[in-house]
Image: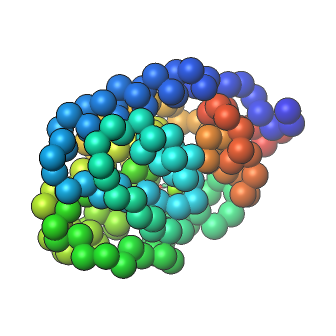
């Protein structure tokens, strides 16, 4: 496919890591009120697969944040364009994110959610690009750590395209 340089993480590897992480979550939060909050649009496929691998009761909610405005460049500004509406003070909350790049998006979202006093708050990200960090932020769990590549597929886009690829691939402008 045009602009798809190579497949970095295939469908089986994604599935296996999700199953492992979901098993840990199911054990850790058994018998507790659990709310999974995913950040749209990028994390929609990860959330769909992750929540179906969780074997305990949980609730699901979505937020929308914008940090990328054009192509592969971060704007540096984070706006929450859709917020969750429920009171989270009675829940253990896990944020389900697609990728941590500069860290700005999650730093802003975590700051917002902490103010609402959840029973606990943790972050699980599918992908982590630690070499790109500009704010001091780390996930509690990253399923895959990747080099400084711009990646697409499995929910992640470039200019809103490629989200439907079933694998994670390196994007190339050429
Ligand atoms: P951060 O605020 O810089 O950590 O950026 C987080 C958001 O930027 C992610 O939720 C993605 O939507 C987007 N993003 C960062 N890196 C990539 C990438 O390699 N491919 C596609 N989207 C990315
Ligand atoms: Mg995102």
Q: Is residue 129 visible?
A: no
Along the line of sight, which residue is nearer the eye, 113 or 46? 46
Name the side, left or right, on which 87 lies relative to 47: left
- Residue 106, horizontal then vertical, whole percent: 37, 58
Residue 40 is left or right of residue 57, and the answer is: right
Above or below: residue 63 compared with residue 45: below
Residue 35 in the image: above or below residue 28 = below
Q: Quadrant of residue 18?
A: top left
Q: Could you tell me which residue is drawn at 61 percent across and 47 percent down?
A: 155
x 75%, y 52%: residue? 161
* Residue 155 vertical placement versus 165 (above, below): below
Residue 90: image quadrant is bottom left
Q: Position of residue 110 (x, y in %)?
A: 28, 63
Front residue of this view, candidates 126 and 105: 126
Say above or below: 76 vs 120. below
Q: Position of residue 34 (x, y in %)?
A: 25, 54
Along the horizontal axis of the image, is 92 left or right of 173?
left
In-front residue for pair 19/135: 19
Q: Looking at the image, which residue is at 77% across and 33% down?
A: 4
**Residue in view at x 19 percent, y 44 percent:** 29
Can you say which quadrant of the picture contains the N terminus? top right
Query: Horizontally, is 134 left or right of 146 in the view?
Result: left
Q: Nearer the viewer, residue 11 or 135?
A: 11
């Amino acid at each position: 496919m045009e602009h798809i340089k190579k497949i970095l993480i295939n469908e089986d590897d994604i599935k296996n890591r999700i199953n492992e992480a979901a098993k840990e979550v199911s054990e850790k939060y058994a018998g507790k009120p659990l709310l999974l909050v995913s950040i749209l649009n990028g994390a929609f496929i990860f959330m769909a697969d992750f929540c179906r691998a969780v074997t305990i009761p949980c609730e699901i909610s979505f937020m929308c944040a914008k940090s990328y405005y054009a192509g592969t460049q971060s704007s540096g500004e984070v706006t929450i364009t859709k917020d969750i509406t429920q009171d989270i003070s009675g829940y253990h909350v896990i944020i389900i994110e697609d990728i941590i790049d500069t860290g700005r998006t999650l730093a802003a979202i975590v700051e917002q959610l902490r103010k609402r006093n959840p029973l606990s708050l943790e972050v699980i990200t599918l992908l982590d690009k630690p070499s790109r960090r500009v704010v001091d932020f780390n996930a509690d769990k990253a399923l895959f750590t990747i080099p400084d590549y711009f990646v697409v597929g499995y929910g992640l886009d470039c200019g809103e395209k490629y989200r439907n690829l079933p694998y994670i691939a390196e994007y190339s402008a050429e």
